Image (tube, coloured by chain):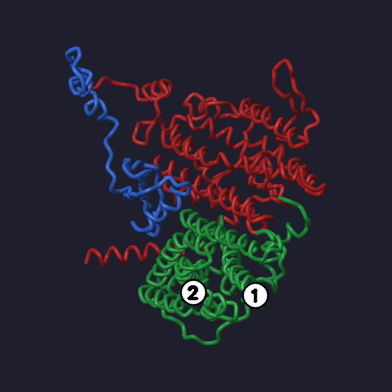
Chain colours: A red, B blue, C green
Amino acid sequence: MTEPINLEEGFQAKIDAELKIEPKDWMPDAYRKTLVRQISQHAHSEVVGMLPEGNWITRAPSLRRKAILLAKVQDEAGHGLYLYSAVETLGTSREKTIDDLLSGKAKYSSIFNYPTLTWADIGAIGWLVDGAAIMNQVMLCRTSYGPYARAMVRICKEESFHQRQGYEIMSVLSKGTEEQQAMAQDALDRWWWPSLMMFGPTDANSPHSAQSMKWKIKRQSNDELRQTFIDRTVQQAEVIGLTIPDPELKWNEGTKQYDWGTIDWTEFYDVVAGNGPCNKERSAARNKAHDEGEWVRNAAMAYAAKKAKQKAA
Amino acid sequence: MSENPNNWPLWEIFIQSKRGLEHKHVGSLHAADAQMAIENARDVYTRRQEGNSIWAVLADNLHSSRPEDAESFYDPADDKVYRHPTFYTMPEGAKYI
Amino acid sequence: MSMSNALFTYTLRRADDLLILSQRLGEWCGHGPVLEEDIALTNRTLDHLGEARNLLTYAGQVEGKGRSEDDLAYLRMEREFTNVKLVETPNGNYAHTLVRSFLFDAYHLPLMQALLESKDEQLAAIAGKAVKEATYHLRHSSEWLIRFGDGTEESHQRAQAALDAIWTYTGELFETDAVDAELVKAGIAPDIASIQEAWSKTVDAVLAEATLKRPEDGFMATGGRNGLHTEQMGFLLAEMQHVTRAYPGATW
């Protein structure tokens, strides 16, 4: 009854037919590994991403802004949680995934290794960093692995206010006092290039990209997404009267796209390698929360075990 | 599956979004016991009024069919068209049927 | 004291308790013991902040000088804040944070329940929303207290230590003065004795289940309602207010 089938070919056929891969389906080891690496990096980015923004919760300049920021940072915890859950469907426990973050073995988005220095940085992060993240996330709603795609759909739904609240902050600052305008421009100056780096290396230097595209984990290349982001964001900056810090930025009538300058890739690889302004602080903060939470987690388990025993008796 | 016995187990969460609808799987989370699982689900999965009722099932207690059984499980239903109302021819002019 | 003065002070006291508690709890966001609990705690923080905003806005209206929620939150000086000291105590470890919340929740819920009957429609309406939230908060903090008390030896010790350290701040919750007397007479505020009784009952029941010991009522801290705070309060306000104060008149 069973014909000899090539598992790998069958797998690729499903992908080509736009069928989702589900946890119990056969999948190549490399596909599983790529997903575990990518989804856990994504999860870590959400959780580490809480830190630079959380830095301003106690200092938000109005109660409305404070409530919005709390809700946003909380959403990121939720998104980390959804993504850790997606990793668990691949057979890797949250504990293991988080251990890799705490030990420094796992990476997260380098953008979160930059410091939030003024209130305007909260605006810039929402507008640019979330804006860039959303480009990626919208694409990932169609990724080939079912649980990842489903998590992304939920995340995209929730994220829709994140970028808007950031842009609103920037817009209000730009219409504010001279000092506020300067604060907004300074934040844009500092966050613009790191935001472009969020899309990853150029396609030419992105070794895993081709395979990920073939598996439909990724559906658009780094450079494509980056270009779309630029094309959209330049217009938004104009509307609120801010200047993109790129002297080479220029509309190209031929390509109907913006031409733009060059990313400082030395900085990019430096931060990835651990030499960003806040790499050590971020790692220390996550480790501290984990270590200081241990007795709390243990207490809950001990209590649950006691109660289960009493119930059984 | 967990390496450390102090790790909170994994729960699968099902939420009914509106009275009268079915409970739908929304994702999973960790909790020390059932009560905490339900409360965590409330905090994690109903922040935008998505919920009316929550089910939490310990992931270890959830059993799943195997993909390799798919053909023998589901294909035999292929040719049983008589299970569908459109299979039948009704006489012209009959109403409410 | 005129009635509107009393109502302003009474509303502001309720608002300040919630504002300062949410300011403290907000420090946890992103640093919680586990993701699920980080999210749960932030839900609580948002509830407190939302209630504080409603109360501050109302206090501003009662006062009639055109002060907004932000004016009241960001532009008052330390001596003008009327929260109890309990809520300004630093977070400490997670046991301290949740014991503090438990002792507050056990007071806040019956207070809001009683305010449902307030002759002041606005306060009654604010309480209507707050009661639902406070019911969940008390459930959340009670359950954690029980887990800590009856969990591991370490968690038991931490919870008991937190309880012993914080107990001195609970007396203030039940202090009354001329403001309360006037509003009780007018049917706007409840008699605090009934709230204290409900609080004490909840505390006894939860501590018993948690196998924790209720501390003796010794020296009780006082002063918060009249703007005399702990030394920590100035730092809390400096952090909360500094951006707003650095750019006078700016909108955000």
Q: Which label lies toward us, 2 or 1? A: 1
Left or right for A166, reference A97: right
User: How far is mark 2 from mark 1, CA to CA?
Assistant: 19 Å
- The chain under label 1 reads C
Q: Position of residue C237 (x, y in %)?
A: 68, 66
User: In the rendered image, which quarter is residue C85 located in?
Assistant: bottom right
Residue toward you, B86 or C191: C191
Above-or-below relation of A1 to C8: above
Residue toward you, B51 or A130: B51
Q: Position of residue A310 (x, y in %)?
A: 26, 67
Looking at the picture, which amino acid does disc 2 mark? Pro
Left or right for A184, reference A282: right
Looking at the picture, which amino acid does disc 1 mark? Ser
Image quarter of the N terminus of chain C: bottom right
Q: Residue furthest bottom?
A: C218
Residue that carries the numbered disc 2 in the rendered image: C190
Left or right for B6, reference A249: left
Residue that carries the numbered disc 1 in the rendered image: C2
One can see residue C166 in this view: no
Query: Which residue shows up at 56% across the image and 39% down it?
Result: A160
Query: Which residue shows up at 37% across the image and 48% down it?
Result: B52
Left or right for C145, reference A1: right
- The chain under label 2 reads C
Say few, some or many: other residues with alpha carbon within 10 Å of mark 1 (under 14 / 14 to 19 / 20 or more). few
Query: Which residue shows up at 25% across the image and 64% down it?
Result: A311
